[in-house]
Amino acid sequence: MDFRRINGLPPYVFTIIDSLKVESRRAGHDVIDLGFGNPDLPSPDIAVSKLCEAAGNPRNHRYSSSRGIPKLRQAVADLYQRRFGVDLDPETEVINTIGAKEGFSHLMWVLLEAGDAVLVPSPSYPIHLFAPLFAGANVREMPLTSNQDDFFDTLTERFEFSWPRPRVIVLSFPHNPTTTCVDLDFMQRVVDFARERDVVLVHDFAYAELGFDGVKPPSILEAEGAKDVAVEFYSMTKSFSMAGWRMAFMVGNPEVVAALAKLKSYLDYGTFQPIQIAATVTLNEAVDYPVEVGEVYQRRRDALCDGLQRIGWEIEPPRGTMFAWAPIPEQYSHMGSVEFASMLVKDADVAVSPGVGFGPGGEGFVRFALIENEQRINQAVRNLRGSLDKLR
């Protein structure tokens, strides 16, 4: 049979490592999973208790609104004012999405069609590459560097030399998988660039609250004039450790918000209303929870990076996200990232994500997810030390 939208998709390389992990565990091995970025921290108590309360009310069992209930959109606007000093109109500049992936994917349907072009950083979180492809667009990759000036130059060059000229530029900082962070000056330069060229900026702000060592990731909407051209996705998945709740928001340019709302009105009735109610209360009353979550991830980052440095695996500690992006050690550089990650599962009982799973630009790296406690991370380092003997 001809499944036209998925026939061209490459194999999802992460399933290779996942299969090896399952196989090893069935054989009795204690595999430490630092691969899939699935938060292990519990959701706030207030979210759980309010969900149970709201779910007990039959009035909340009916269809909800795909835009999000008014109090939820107001809570998001309040968060942006409190956290970033950004004013949002909850009626026209905020929409609820069923997780950021759903919102981003459907937004690409709104903004792009066959023959259009979009700029996306490389390497990239997979949906940033494939959602535009599902919409029929051509993806132009921008190699991402840790130096934000160099990256801006690359962005400018790729835009000017692309034909057709890209209609959309996708950004995501702090960045998954590379953990790259940028400052507000970079955001302002990109906004100015987009306003001059009538381009839509889409910023996936999944790790908005996960900056380390004093880093406070900026919202793109803090840049002057950003609402003219930009929208941003804010998710409760990482900041509030509410991954399975599928609770995210797109905020910013009112025309783009209205366009996504129109499409979603045909596609869904929104998230289950008790979840929306619980998220509203959480945003309003658990304002310090993201700080607590960030402190946990920073301690885990320190445990992992300090441990890897001790065993001779050179790695730059990330300044944001819940990941560490590690070059394959020189002694194993002849291996591809899939082969190297597979070896770690088999020989060290440690699962990581192969860099090539984030596009060709990720080859030569693996990604560690900080989803185990410090004791388990220390155990993973000991396993790696015993397995990667050539590092010593």
Image (cartoon, grey):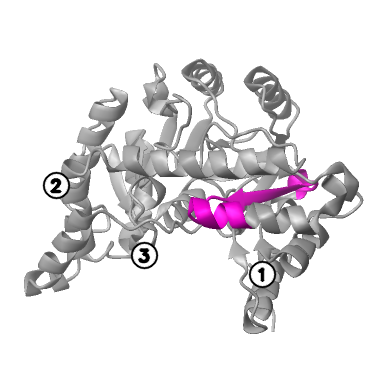
The amino acid on which the numbered mark 2 sits, given as a three-letter code, is Lys
- Which residue is identified by label 1? 15
Which of 152 and 262 lies nearest the eye of the viewer?
152
Q: Amino acid at mark 3?
A: Leu
- The range drawn in magenta is 360-379
Q: Earlier in the sequence, mark 3 or mark 2?
A: 2
- SS class, disc 3: helix
- Can the viewer see residue 379? yes
Q: Which residue is under mark 2?
A: 71
Residue at the image position 87 percent from the left and 42 percent from the top = 330
User: Is 210 situated above or below 353?
Assistant: above
Instruction: Give the percent coordinates (x, y) of residue 130.
Output: 62, 55
User: 91 or 51: nearer the eye?
Assistant: 51
Q: Earlier in the sequence, mark 1 or mark 2?
A: 1
Residue 64 in which image quadrant: bottom left
Image quarter hosting the C terminus: top right
